[in-house]
Image: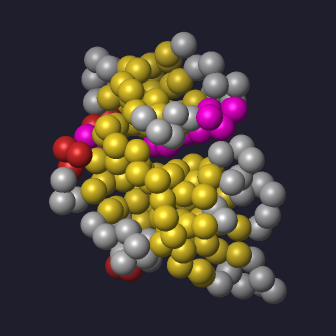
Amino acid sequence: HELGAARALITLAKDDNIYSGGSDGKIIKWKHNDGQWPAEVLVDKVGNPNYQVYSMDVNPTETILVAAGLYTPDEKNNFINVYDLKNMSAPKKVYGFTNSVENVHFTPDGKGVYIRDNAGRSIKYSDLNTAKEVIKPPVKINSIDLSWDGKKLAGAGENGVLYIWD
């Protein structure tokens, strides 16, 4: 990543690949090969103009990668990119997000993602086609995580309080 811009990292269980995303707009695949980690740029600035990648997740079957971040020319009309890992050239854009979009977590069934939106002032659910606010937290949330069974969502508030939603 250019100028130390790496911001997101995801590993896969089924193979030796690591994917990184950055504020340089790149998504890079790193594959362990003979003691080395050569980089393959899957998405670059040309394919991802003005989009900074802040967070990524891969569905449980490891076929879909969701990248979230910031579309700098129009922060109020932000989106996430949904990629088929076999063809990263044409992502589906899902709109309905505002400002920086971070902390992407696939549901255990792989049918959707929970996302920290609006720089932590909203939590949305996306079925990979649409986005809907599901939680309007009382304070800015700095980070979220989804339980392994998908039944609870935890958030770390800027006020030092841990929030748990059912």
Q: Position of residue 70 (x, y in %)?
A: 30, 54
Q: Is residue 101 visible?
A: no
Name which quarter of the figure residue 19 lies in: bottom right
From what the image shows, is residue 40 above or below residue 126?
below
From what the image shows, is residue 4 above or below residue 165?
below
Quadrant that contains the C terminus: top right
Say if the magenta span includes residue 106: yes
For residue 125, side relative to residue 24 (left or right): right
Name which quarter of the figure residue 101 lies in: top left
Say if the magenta span includes residue 158: no
Residue in the image at 36% along x and 25% along y: 133
Q: Position of residue 37 (x, y in %)?
A: 68, 81
Q: Is residue 50 visible?
A: yes
Q: Which of the pair 130/135 is nearer the observer?
A: 130
Q: Main secondary structure of the magenta part?
A: loop
Q: Which of the pair 127/104 is nearer the observer?
A: 127
Residue in the image at 64% along x and 74% along y: 30
Residue in the image at 50% along x and 17% along y: 164
Name which quarter of the figure residue 14 lies in: bottom right
Residue in the image at 51% along x and 40% along y: 128
**Which stretch appears magenta?**
98-111
Q: Position of residue 62 (x, y in %)?
A: 71, 52
